[in-house]
Amino acid sequence: MHLRVLEPCRENWDTMEPTAVGRRCQACEREVIDLTGVTERQAKRLLADRRACVRMRVGDHGLPLFRREPPRLGPAAAAMALAACAPHTPEAQRLAPAIEVERTASERPTPVIPEAAPRVAAAPEPGPPKPGKGPAKKRERVLMGDPWE
């Protein structure tokens, strides 16, 4: 979905009157649709039949950031695969159950650590990250405005 707010609105979101899908701006008398917590599919549905201002999160590239779509087919496919592997014949249902074996503490083998094992250094003390080190944080911001101007 391609949305860009060229001139961000300076009105305060918190002072706007709540509506079903966002807020109503008193300055321009337009509805501002909140896209900050929706998926791209939901955003398309919300904007399909109306021209309104939007409130959205944007990344460094200036494009909108949407919530990820929940997985749909993964769990269903896994359940179907497991069901296909299960025995379906009456003979399989009558088989004797497997015998469980209990292992006691005295039966457990003692681990042997060789002398030539590499030594592991102690973990660093927790604290604030050092400047210039670590992964770069993605910057994001929330913009409001008319994406159709």
Image (cartoon, rainbow, N blue to C red):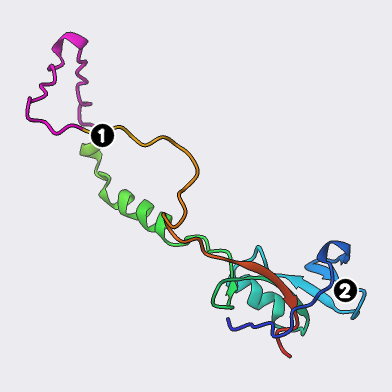
Residue at 74 percent of width and 79 percent of height: 8
Segment tinted magenta in the rendering: 94-119
Indicate left or right for 107 with 11 as reference: left
Task: For label 2, count other residues whose C-alpha is less than 10 Å away and answer few (under 14), some (14-19) or many (20+).
Answer: some
Q: Position of residue 32 (x, y in %)?
A: 80, 74
Residue 25: numbered disc: 2
Which picture quadrant has residue 125?
Answer: top left
- Badge 2 amino acid: Cys
Q: Residue 106 appears in which quarter of the rendering?
A: top left
Left or right, residue 87 beside residue 77: left
Asked whether residue 124 is drawn in magenta, I would say no
Provide the residue designation for mark 1.
121
Q: Secondary structure at mark 2?
A: loop
Quadrant of the frame with the N terminus: bottom right
Residue in the image at 48% along x and 39% along y: 127
Residue depicted at x 70% and y 75%: 46
**Amino acid type shown at disc 1:** Ala
Mark 1 vs mark 2: in front? 1
